[in-house]
Every structure is written in C-alpha cells, then in structure tokens.
Amino acid sequence: QVQLAESGGGSVQPGGSLRLSCVPSGRFFSISVMSWHRQAPGKEREFVAEINWSGPVTAYADSVKGRFTISRDNSNTLYLQMNSLKPEDTAVYYCKLATSNGPQYWGQGTQVTVSS
C-alpha cells in the first residue's frame, strides 16, 4: 500500500516561510510526476506546483510563481519551499504522486495557516 506522508505545515505570519516535505512509502512503479495541491475552506482543491521526475521540469500556478519552489531529492522526497507567504495561501496542502504506469496517490494533507 502506497502512503504519502506530508509534514512541515504550521502557522506563520504574513511574509514568513515554511518548507513542506512529502515522503512516499510502499511499493509503486516508477514516479512520473509529483505535485502539490491545496484546498482552502469552502473552495475546491487547486494545483500549486509540480515536478517531472526525470527532468526535472517544474511548473507553478500563477498565484505562487516567484514565491514557492518545488524540488525533490534522490530519496524520492518532495519539497515545497514557501516564501513571502500571504493570508490567501492558507489551506490544507496535499502532495500527489503519479506513476509511470497510471496509478496516482494522495497524501492526507498538512495545514498551512498564514495570519497576523
């Protein structure tokens, strides 16, 4: 059974920084893409950033470009460095793993709250 463990969320003041991590475990085929998504209260889940595992090629939502950086390491851990955080970044952040043979997996999410 594949599991994705997110960590690094918390509360921070506007302008602050947080670094999220996502560690996959279990048996799965090779990774194609890993990504971060978020869901604010009362809103639909939205795309934040993704990284193509073989590239690595990255892509970002316009709302986070220049402030967030997605990265990975050789242990398959996914990161999201979030700088210059704004109150509108408040959400539950989820990581997603897409395999090369099709199946996709989601983590349970980590709460990020930006408030003064």
Image: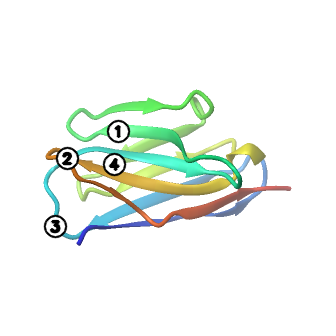
Three-letter amino acid code at the position of disc 3:
Arg
Q: Label 4: state its secondary structure.
A: strand
Task: Farthest residue to the top: give it.
Answer: 62
Disc 2 or 3, which lies upstream in sequence? 3
Picture residue at 21% right of the left edge, 70% below the top: 26
Disc 4 or 1, which lies upstream in sequence? 1
Q: Distance between the residues labelled 4 and 1?
A: 8 Å
Q: Tag on residue 90?
A: none
Label 4 crowd (10 A; few <14 / some 14-19 / many >=20): some
Query: In the rendered image, which residue does mark 4 sit on?
Result: 72
Tell me the quadrant of the picture where the C terminus can be found: bottom right
Q: How far apart are marks 3 and 4 (CA)?
A: 19 Å
In this view, 6 is above or below 95: below
> Looking at the image, do the residues carrying marks 4 and 1 touch, with CB atoms under 8 Å apart?
yes
Mark whose residue sits in front, 3 or 1:
3
> Looking at the image, do the residues carrying marks 4 and 2 touch, with CB atoms under 8 Å apart?
no
Query: In the rendered image, which residue does mark 1 sit on?
Result: 51
Q: Label 1: state its secondary structure.
A: strand
Disc 2 or 1, which lies upstream in sequence? 1
Q: Tag on residue 102?
A: 2
Classify residue 74 as left or right of residue 43: left
Classify residue 115 as left or right of residue 2: right
Q: Where is residue 85 in the image (x, y as percent from the top left)?
A: 69, 45
Q: Tag on residue 27?
A: 3
Q: Position of residue 105 (x, y in %)?
A: 32, 58
Picture residue at 40% right of the left edge, 60% below the top: 22
